Amino acid sequence: MNTLTHDRPGVHPPHGHAHGPTGLMRWVTTTNHKDIGTMYMIFSFIMFLSGGVMALTIRAELFQPGLQVVEPEFFNQLTTMHGLVMVFGAIMPAFVGFANWMIPLMIGASDMAFARMNNWSFWLLPPAAILLLGSFFVPGGATAAGWTLYAPLSVQMGMGMDLAIFAIHIMGVSSIMGAINIVVTVLNMRAPGMNMMRMPLFCWTWLITAYLLIAVMPVLAGAVTMILTDRHFGTSFFNAAGGGDPVMYQHIFWFFGHPEVYIMILPAFGIVSQIIPTFSRKPLFGYASMVYATSSIAILSFTVWAHHMFTTGMPAIGQLFFMYATMLIAVPTGVKVFNWVATMWRGSLSFETPMLWATGFIFVFTMGGFTGLICAIAPIDIQLQDTYYVVAHFHYVLVAGSLFALFAGAYYWLPKWTGHMPSEFLGKLHFWCSIVFFNITFFPMHFLGLAGMPRRIPDYALQFADFNAMASIGAFGFGLSQLIFLVAVVKCVRGGKKAEAQSWEGAEGLEWTVPSPAPHHTFEDAPVLAKA
């Protein structure tokens, strides 16, 4: 760590003053976990807005039947890029930003274990994002094979596909480095007296997520590299004419893809598990069972991938295995929901903005979980596969799950990050607009799917028109509501009510023992926890 060099005789800090580089170079060269966490979050919000613009263009096209706004080819590029940008550019970096900021504070560490690698893992992301978003402007446009990049389409695409493959490789490297950093930090840098079972749940969920990342990111890299060699080097991994199998791609992709969706939800569970006890003014119900439930979700996530593939001609025994495994993974998730509700039971509840988001999360995420359980039943899924029902399901768990939890966490820790309390009025307005418009957008999609409307189409039959118009109006409402968040954060950064060290009544943990805003270097001397 180079942060302590200032105190050593004979070692002069750069530029002749005590703080090292300032201005732009401070951010480019920083190894401080807080700076890097902030950069991750700013990056993810920019990507979130760009993915949001793509979504609104999709919904503008689907407002009425017929081809209205964009060409069908461009529509397919938008649906693909919206998925890739939101998953790899918005949700995952946002959670890594939270991990960078909060894990050292929560475990009493001075910084992340590998501070320089931490900087590098962030700075890989902007070039990857430029490659991804720049692919719209190359001949043939961006990739249009769906975010899953299924062969044979992905083998036949233009140059935009190569850029997407390269971008995914770079983002994958960034994710693996971030994950290694988190694992080593959590395992090796806890304050004296903090054993594993005394760690905040956010640290637990991120530790388990990091192991998942290390396990599955190389699998995705392998899958997209095989597409690359099929495209340019004459191999036939996924080309049936050359002895390959396009279904093999689906198996490899979803072996990554299903653990990936848990990578995007487990840190959300961690955030909610921090917030609910705070505003219930009582300890989390069933801490140990939460840890075991999170671990079992992570392990089981490797046994369910083929539920995405019930219609590919799988033998009945395969369908049965994946159906039951998928239903089984709902059990530990149910344990978590039960524990959150049990924590709130007879607690001294107050509904400040973070708590609103957390309770909203539980309600809407649970709905998304149930629709997923319905998709798990093979004979039903064969009817629902590739319809809007699936779109409704995964947006309920990814938007109302991951995104709502991110907002909850942002409002919860903003006092610690900025030193000011966020505006309750704006936070609550943001919540109510978001949850109302979210449901107006995605709830009708269940009915569209049940009626048989396929996904990823720019035009549709007349009978689907009413629900589509509703969904599009809701989408524009939901998209514009996110600007309230931007205003709330900017206001909070610029000033507002001063935050105490313990910003929320009932908040516990080491991060609430340091001043707000948290000093640039915290815990140079590790705090010692009293024996439990």
Image: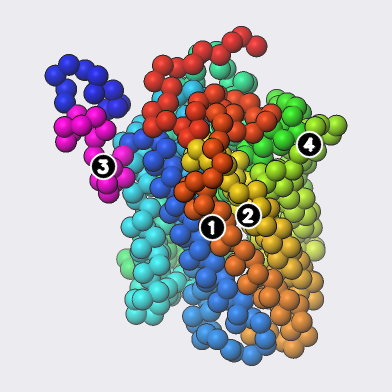
- The residues tagged by marks 1 and 2 sit, at their Cα atoms, a distance apart of 8 Å
Pointers 4 and 3 in contact (CB under 8 A)?
A: no
Tell me the quarter of the picture where residue 448 sits: bottom right
Looking at the rendered structure, the kind of residue marked 3 is Thr
* Position of the C terminus by quadrant: top right
| 86 relative position to 400: left or right | left
Q: SS of the residue at dot 4? A: loop
Circle 1 residues within 10 Å: few <14, some 14–19, many ≥20:
some
Q: SS of the residue at dot 1? A: helix
Q: SS of the residue at dot 2? A: helix
Looking at the rendered structure, the kind of residue marked 1 is Val
* Position of the N terminus by quadrant: top left
Q: Earlier in the sequence, mark 2 or mark 4?
A: 4
Circle 4 residues within 10 Å: few <14, some 14–19, many ≥20:
some
Q: Position of residue 531 (x, y in %)?
A: 61, 9
- The residues tagged by marks 4 and 1 sit, at their Cα atoms, a distance apart of 27 Å
Marks 3, 2: nearer the viewer: 2
Q: Position of residue 118 (x, y in %)?
A: 37, 39
| 420 relative position to 429: left or right | left
- The residues tagged by marks 2 and 4 sit, at their Cα atoms, a distance apart of 21 Å
Which residue is painted at 78% across and 54% down in the image? 367
